[in-house]
Amino acid sequence: MGRLALAVVAGLGLATAYSAAAQEAEPAQPTHFPIEQPDEQRWSFAGFFGTFDEAQLQRGYQVYKEVCSICHSMSLLAFRSLGEEGGPHFGEEEVKALAAGYQVADGPDENGDMFERPGRPYDRLPAPFANPQAAAAANGGATPPDLSVIAKARGASRGVLWGLVDFFAQYQEGGVDYVHGLLTGYRDPPEGLVVPEGTYYNPYFMSAVSLKMPPPLSDGQVTYGDGSPETVDQYGRDVAAFLMWASDPHLVERKRIGFQVFIYLAVFAGLMYATKRKVWSSVAH
Amino acid sequence: MEHTAYQPKGRFARWLESRLPIIGFAHRSFVVYPTPRNLNYWWTFGAILTFMLAAQIATGVVLAMHYIPEASMAFASVEHIMRDVNYGWLLRYLHANGASMFFFAMYIHMFRSLYYGSHKEPREVLWILGVIILLLMIMTAFMGYVLPWGQMSFWAATVITSLFTAIPIVGDAITTWLWGGFAVDSPTLTRFYSLHYLLPFMIAGVVILHIWALHVVGQNNPLGIGVKSKEDTVRFTPHATIKDLFGLSVFLILYAWLTFFLPNYLGHPDNYIPANPLQTPAHIVPEWYLLPFYAILRAIPNKLTGVIALFASIAVLVFVPWLDTSRVRSATFRPIYRQFFWIFVLVTIGLGYLGSQPPEGGYLIAARLLTTYYFLHFLIILPVVGLIERPKPLPTSITEAVLAKSGAAAEAGA
């Protein structure tokens, strides 16, 4: 009995000390994430008439292929989509060559065996790991997320006031700003901040002070064929734009049709209003 | 008060009319039907809602041809619709934003009723049918939100179905029965899909009853006084038809703005992360149109009481025709009620905001205050104000009021 009471007292003491310590540590250790909101970038695809920059998407695909795809899958994306208008718009032969650069599992053949063959345009991009568990085991315990719709799956809440402004300003680039901010935002942690072992400080990361992905980009890492600057910022911008397209591949078509719908509705509403005035002109109401 | 009865002209029309008088019925209901001449644009939302129901069913039926209600394939099938189905992106964005527009119109329609006393005698049944439609819409929208099987879908389904565990004794058994297993999983998704397809047709059925009841008692109007003579009304077509069409086309501009230029503005980014039962999102929130109810649910510390409050917040609407004791319908002539009406509107918007915030600290206290006020409004304020308020004098007829107003306008113009 005495022992139990002692254990309870000791437990309470420990708990109090622990919560006190947690409180003391609080000022230096942030609890709301992301620590910093990403900077709003200028994007060619923002706004009423936004369209993708084909050259940028092609560079972005190159960055994805040479850097990101080592760990991250894009399993919803088909090679053929890379040749579509309103996207990177690679030529037909280029798409075939891009697909053929991958080995894709197929089968079973007539003997019942699975086999590998070169990719074809209708294949989806093969994943770098066999399953999420294998991906986690190779990456320090965290599964690198699939990037197919990542630009729509990110974006911090901006609060009620900014939310209202965004409605009228038509801001739909929170996700792509986030991706760019994260890729270019790695830096040394501020004095006194505790960064867990095996993780990297990034104030733009949405759910903690740091993440398990090491800084993926460095200056000069990818060689561009079109003379664009080979900097972390440019790489981050290009690959973020590419991921935005992959998340919403019909964005350009959507905005184009949206504009036509607007003209149609404006004219239609005008006609309805004029007719309404005419019909009601003889009736006091 | 009929304007002119339908006279079948052709031979076929006469033949059909003597066997199934459907053309005469449509003519009576939507052409010569007498509609008060003083309706304002708040009355166009009935037509807008009918359009939205039809639009949701039309887009939904096509989406259902491509969607797969199975846990391992649902997310990818939605993205297949977005990428590979011809205009699939358009159908899906129309359908997802259509739900928001549907609720937006529904709330305006309901607030309009509360302001002008459209729920009052003799329109009690009409109002109650509307509350049933709201309840069915909430269930349909919630199940529709689960179908993309993203993180928010999965966790919203988990949170809401877990509410049934609060029922004493049989709660766990009911929840297991709802889930079709011991957690939200593929069987849950498949039955939600089935119900999501079924409920809209039930809504359509109740809408027919709603319109039937409306045509029995006639439309209310901004003055809240009854139609007394043929003079007080105009033919539904062309007068109401063209006004509804203009209202609808302005509404469609807003709908198009969301669909084409802000398609994901009202959604939560987490719903583009595939459902993961092992990882709870930081904040689980429903769609915006359910946030006030969600705030009420979470404002109450006891789970069972919270669930009861959630259902009571909708059930209380059924009793509004009798809780509102005023003999005058329109808030135009009710100076005190009018102020409480606008306070109530602000309270529901406030509850919506609090539903989007974590239930802690000041947010929780505010949510409790506003929840209390929500029920006070119906249970105390409505009956008491109706009894103590002295309404302004009512005009003797719609025509008189309308002519007085247009006469004054003509004088001011001259």
Image (cartoon, coloured by chain):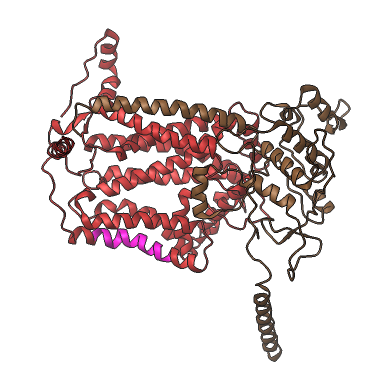
Chain colours: A brown, B red
Q: Residue at the spot x=40%, y=25% of the render?
A: A268
Q: Magenta part of the protein: which range?
A: B368-383
**Badge count:** 0
Q: Nearer the viewer, residue B254 or B74?
A: B254
- In reply to whether residue B329 is colored magenta, the answer given is no
User: Is B373 inside the magenta-drawn segment?
Assistant: yes
| Snapshot quadrant of residue B249 | top left
Q: From the viewer's perspective, is residue A47 above or below residue B347?
A: above
Q: Is residue B274 visible?
A: no
Residue at image point 71% right, 37% down: A76
Q: Estimate the x, y position of residue B253 in percent, counting from the top left.
A: 44, 34
Q: Can you name the residue that lies furthest to the bottom here? A: A2
Q: Is residue A222 visible?
A: yes
Quadrant assignment for the N terminus of chain B:
top left
Q: Main secondary structure of the magenta part?
A: helix
Question: Residue lying farthest left?
Answer: B396
In this rendering, the answer to whether B77 lies above or below B345 is: above
- The image quarter in which residue B338 lies: bottom left
| Rendering coords of residue B35 (x, y %) | 22, 32
| Residue in the picture at 40% in, 36% down | B251
Q: Front-most of B212 and A218?
A: A218
- The residue closer to the viewer here, B179 or B323, is B323
